[in-house]
């Protein structure tokens, strides 16, 4: 079975929306809910990182399979069920056109097929999914395998926006695609700006910033010029939070009323954090989130104080 055929079950984002949810029914606030955010399963990186050959290494990913299986099993055990499970990019390590990409993709899809059918998957594109410098061809491959690279959806009165952050990093090979996302995003932000939603939340792979909007440029954030422009846009529109991955460590900060949340990886850790997932509780007033190790979530589930938030109307 080809990767494209195997990916059929995951093609839920089409026409710039996620068909797992009814947009009309989901536009009204119905009370608190929660979702699970993960990032960077990145099948193949652990071997590549350990050997120091991140460009062409990564011919083994048994550890990532085991960790992602543990993540899925932990999510499936949770009650009540999360509204959805979002993976914020770098699904596999092999870049477009590189060895092992097809095999890594098929193995990840096999694991993700075991997610409870009542928990929709939300898939965000990362730099390893579309390339550090994406092209129309790499974007088309992602869309064919996983679904749209940017889209919106509604859950319980909350507007969620999924962005392709590579367009914000280096779109020199696909300027028209970058422009199309920018125009679409302005339309979506106008909805948020008119306060027609309880909250608005953004998912993207590369963080705006790791700690401060004024920090130096690095591989792990967007450039100062871009991040300030996007942060101002988001803040003006009333976006409450941006959730991302890419850093393989937990980080984050605030800008005005915007919460920048950087979650560590399901897969390879580049710091002192553990393989884990973030639980995000959405109430009428606020968004509360906490990072759990896979072992913690598997063995103990969600802590009582977060569960109590779900009971408040």
Image (cartoon, rainbow, N blue to C red):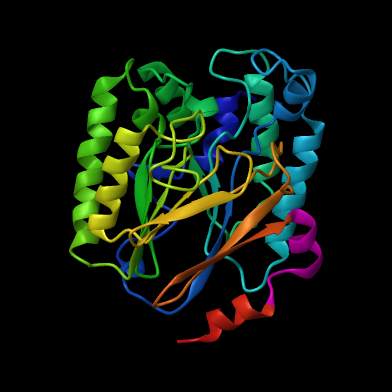
Is residue 195 something that shows in the picture? yes
Q: Chief secondary structure of the magenta span? A: helix
Quadrant of the snapshot with the N terminus: top right
Quadrant of the snapshot with the C terminus: bottom left
Range of magenta residues:
294-303
Q: Position of residue 79 (x, y in %)?
A: 66, 72
164 displayed left or right of 187:
right
Instruction: In this rendered view, identify the residue nearer to me: 77 or 290.
Output: 290
Is residue 262 something that shows in the picture? no
Instruction: In this rendered view, identify the residue nearer to me: 223 or 263.
Output: 223
Report the residue at 47% width, 25% height from top: 130
100 displayed left or right of 128:
right
Is residue 297 within the magenta segment?
A: yes
174 displayed left or right of 133:
left
Work out whether 17 lies above or below 132.
below
Work out whether 263 lies above or below 110.
below
The answer to which image quadrant residue 15 occupies is top left
Is residue 304 within the magenta segment?
A: no
Report the residue at 55% width, 26% height from top: 128
Work out whether 32 lies above or below 217.
below
180 displayed left or right of 261:
left
């Amino acid at each position: 079975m080809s990767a494209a055929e195997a990916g059929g079950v995951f093609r839920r984002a089409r026409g710039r929306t996620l068909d797992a949810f009814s947009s009309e029914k989901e536009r009204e606030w119905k009370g608190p809910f929660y979702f699970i955010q993960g990032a960077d399963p990145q099948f193949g990186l652990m071997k590549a990182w350990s050997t120091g050959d991140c460009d062409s290494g990564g011919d083994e990913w048994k550890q990532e399979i085991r960790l992602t299986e543990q993540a899925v099993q932990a999510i499936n055990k949770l009650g009540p069920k999360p509204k959805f499970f979002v993976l914020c990019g770098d699904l596999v390590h092999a870049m477009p056109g590189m060895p092992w990409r097809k095999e890594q993709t098929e193995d990840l899809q096999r694991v993700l097929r075991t997610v409870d059918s009542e928990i929709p998957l939300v898939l965000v594109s990362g730099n390893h999914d579309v390339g550090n410098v994406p092209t129309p061809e790499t974007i088309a491959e992602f869309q064919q395998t996983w679904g749209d690279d940017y889209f919106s959806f509604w859950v319980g009165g909350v507007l969620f926006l999924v962005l392709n952050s590579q367009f914000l990093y280096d779109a020199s090979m696909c300027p028209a695609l970058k422009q199309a996302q920018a125009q679409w995003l302005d339309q979506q932000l106008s909805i948020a700006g008119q306060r027609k939603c309880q909250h608005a939340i953004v998912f993207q792979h590369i963080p705006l910033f790791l700690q401060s909007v004024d920090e130096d440029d690095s591989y792990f954030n967007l450039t100062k010029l871009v991040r300030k422009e996007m942060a101002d846009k988001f803040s003006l529109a009333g976006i409450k939070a941006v959730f991302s991955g890419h850093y393989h460590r937990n980080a984050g900060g605030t800008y005005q009323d915007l919460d920048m949340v950087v979650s560590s990886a399901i897969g390879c850790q580049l710091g002192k954090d553990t393989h884990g997932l973030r639980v995000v509780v959405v109430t009428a007033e606020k968004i509360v989130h906490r990072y759990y190790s896979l072992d913690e979530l598997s063995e103990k589930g969600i802590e009582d104080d977060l569960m109590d938030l779900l009971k408040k109307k």
